[in-house]
Image: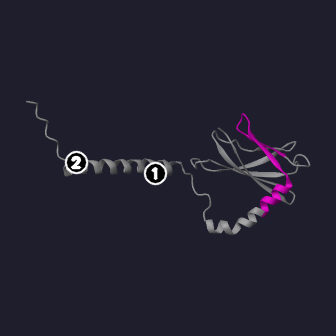
Amino acid sequence: MSPRPAPARRFTGWHMLAILLGMFGTIIAVNVVMARFAVGTFGGTVVDNSYVASQKFNHWLAEARAQEALGWKLQTRVDEGRILRITTSSPMGPLYAATMDAVAIHPLGRAPERKLHFVNAGGGTFASQQPLPEGRWLLRIEVREGRNTARFDDQVGA
């Protein structure tokens, strides 16, 4: 006589409850983790009101074309004392008589933005009057010379 096989276990409501709780628990846990990462790394909005931004778009395009026609270029660097130095150039040479201001923005919004004012260091180079803290910074730079104004975005730091 051969040994009798063990009786098969029945699938009960408790088994189904365990499967459903495991499945939905996994889904909820992944969603919570992803939501925390999303909220913790997003620094804010691109524009406050997309409708208003869309109404200004053609004006922004015209400004961009006018700035491109100027042919101005900037080169940014941070020296050992964390002073931001910006070297200017144009098709006619360095911008000796320009004035410049900038706003340094932390990319994740974890540090307050800083307004930077510049002094002419000679030769078309401008130096910030205050040092820039360690880290990575996004720069919104405005350069004015005569009746011309140009705006640049750049970044410095690690």
**Residue at 65% from the left image edge and 68% from the top image edge:** 52
Nearer to the camera, 72 or 135 = 72
**Residue at 11% from the left image edge and 34% from the top image edge:** 4
**Residue at 64% from the left image edge and 42% from the top image edge:** 136
Based on the picture, tell me whether residue 43 belongs to the magenta stretch: no
Q: Give the residues in magenta.
A: 62-88
**Left or right, 134 with reference to 96:** left
**Residue at 71% from the left image edge and 65% from the top image edge:** 57
Q: Which mark is residue 100?
A: none
Residue 67 image point, x, y percent = 81, 57
The quarter of the picture where the N terminus appears is top left
Is residue 27 placed above or below 48 in the rendered structure?
above
Based on the picture, tell me whether residue 74 belongs to the magenta stretch: yes
Q: Secondary structure at mark 2?
A: helix
Is residue 107 placed above or below 148 in the rendered structure?
above
Is residue 141 placed above or below 2 in the rendered structure?
below
Q: Secondary structure at mark 1?
A: helix
Residue marked by disc 2: 15
Residue 77 image point, x, y percent = 74, 39
Q: Earlier in the sequence, mark 2 or mark 1?
A: 2
Residue marked by disc 1: 35
Nearer to the camera, 30 or 98 = 30
Nearer to the camera, 97 or 91 = 91
**Left or right, 21 with reference to 53:** left
Marks 2,1: beta carbons within 8 A = no
Under mark 1, the amino acid is: Ala
